[in-house]
Image (cartoon, grey):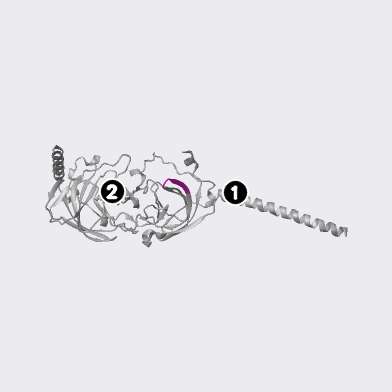
Amino acid sequence: MKRRAIAVSVALLCIGLVSAGSETVGTKPERRVTLLIQKQTPQSNQWEKATVSFRPEEIYAGSREPHNEWDLLYGELNYNGDRDWLRVNCGKHSWSRIRDLGELEWSDEIKVPVLPILPCRTNQRCGRTHIPPPQSGKKIQDEDLNPHIAKPVVGHMYVVHRHREKRDSDFQSPSALFDYYALVRVEELKPNESCTITWKRISAPKN
Amino acid sequence: MRVVRSLGSAFPRRRIRTGKLTFTLAALLTFFVVTDAQDSPALNQVTLFSQITHRDGSRASVNFDSGERGSPTADTSPFDLIFGTLAINDDSNWFEVIDARSMIIDLGRKQWSDFKQTPSFPKSHKPRKPLPLNGRVKEIEASAGSTEISPYQQFVPVKPGHIYLMKVVRERKKTYVMFRVEDLISEDNCRLSWKKVAPPSADVEQ
């Protein structure tokens, strides 16, 4: 009896913690954009058509930030002929994450989970793509392998936590440029060609 | 009559000597051929067809024990090297090792006669980091401007006329293979000549 009470208490505590780690966002998207597969031509690599930035224009425009920074990239990886991947900016100084929340509409009550930023493993550079062996049953988009990569599925909603280290020159810039959340929904997907998304910046969910 | 007899006796003797000489020469020749074959085994050939282009893995990979081609999608893959699985900047002329513990390096534009023995894998300036996640996962750094696409030498670009050295790991076995890209039809197929080689001296010492 005592054990059962302890088990129930632990379960309730867990539910409480999970609830506390989520935030309900009743919202509509801010923007809609179609991202195109990056194609190399002698003139251009069409980089700007494959990427989108979620940063607020009004702050971004007035900052001394380099204006080529991006948050989400479609179609960078081509493995076994599959180019349909979403990748958040993750590298030496950016540790960003993306998670597939499943099929959701903007009108749904969306529970946004907290995505703690994962520092790079010791001696490992962030942002590399890990490819699992076929017999492992794992997939490239598995969060424990590649927390910065997701598979675009029409109708699915994704949460992005973008984080970038401040440079020395950034000390006066608002933190909104360095750490923020966004929701992304995949509206259309033409395989290996284009991916249309709607997106909205959201406030960081509270722990 | 004597002349005839002597001729008659001399002829078979000379015949025997010629026979012995031929046998000795043949034996020596065989010896040299066998010795040479041990030093540089005959080259095998295989043509691999790009998995991305042909959307068919049945001719994309090779087993360096048997020379067979096939698709490395089975539970326990018997293949060692695959062509055309990865594309970087719209270029899918890449080799990929099947087992993440294998490694492959490009030795440059060479002829077979340029190598008298197995060269060593170049030593990195930085200490080599352990393979991630128990060494079963491959890693690529495909972001723009990256100079090190495959930090663990699991992928390498395919270049015609280049010779490659590969450490082939399959299950608990480790062997070494050198191969040359004899022909490349870009994004479609490549013909390799290859042979198993002795381990590089640096690897024997380890």
Q: Residue at x 72, y 55 (%)?
A: B19
Q: Which of B62 and B114 lies nearest the eye of the viewer? A: B62
Residue A104 in sight in this render = yes
Residue B89 as seen in the image, left or right of residue B196: left
Mark 2 — residue?
A146
Q: Residue furthest top?
A: A2
Q: Which of B20 and B88 lies nearest the eye of the viewer? A: B20
Observer-side mark, 1 or 2, equals 1
Residue A207 in sight in this render = no
The x, y position of residue B2, in whole percent, is: 87, 58
Q: Amino acid at mark 2?
A: Asn
Q: Residues within 10 Å of mark 1 (few under 14, many from 20)?
A: few
Disc 1 with disc 2 on a shared chain = no
Residue B35: give its label. 1
Please tell me in which quadrant of the rendered image residue B132 appears.
top left
The x, y position of residue B156, in whole percent, is: 40, 51
Name the dominant secondary structure of the magenta segment.
strand
The x, y position of residue B41, in whole percent, is: 54, 51
SS for callout 1: helix
Question: Which part of the image, by quadrant, shows the N terminus of chain A?
Answer: top left
Q: Residue at x 24, y 46 (%)?
A: A96
Q: Residues within 10 Å of mark 2 (few under 14, many from 20)?
A: many
Q: Amino acid at mark 1?
A: Thr
Count of labels in the image: 2
Q: The numbered mark 1 sits on a residue in which chain? A: B
Q: Which of B188 and B65 lies nearest the eye of the viewer? A: B65
Q: Is residue B70 magenta?
A: no
The x, y position of residue B183, in whole percent, is: 47, 59
Magenta residue span:
B171-176
Q: Residue furthest left?
A: A26
Q: CA distance from mark 1 to mark 2?
A: 51 Å
Q: Residue at x 76, y 56 (%)?
A: B15
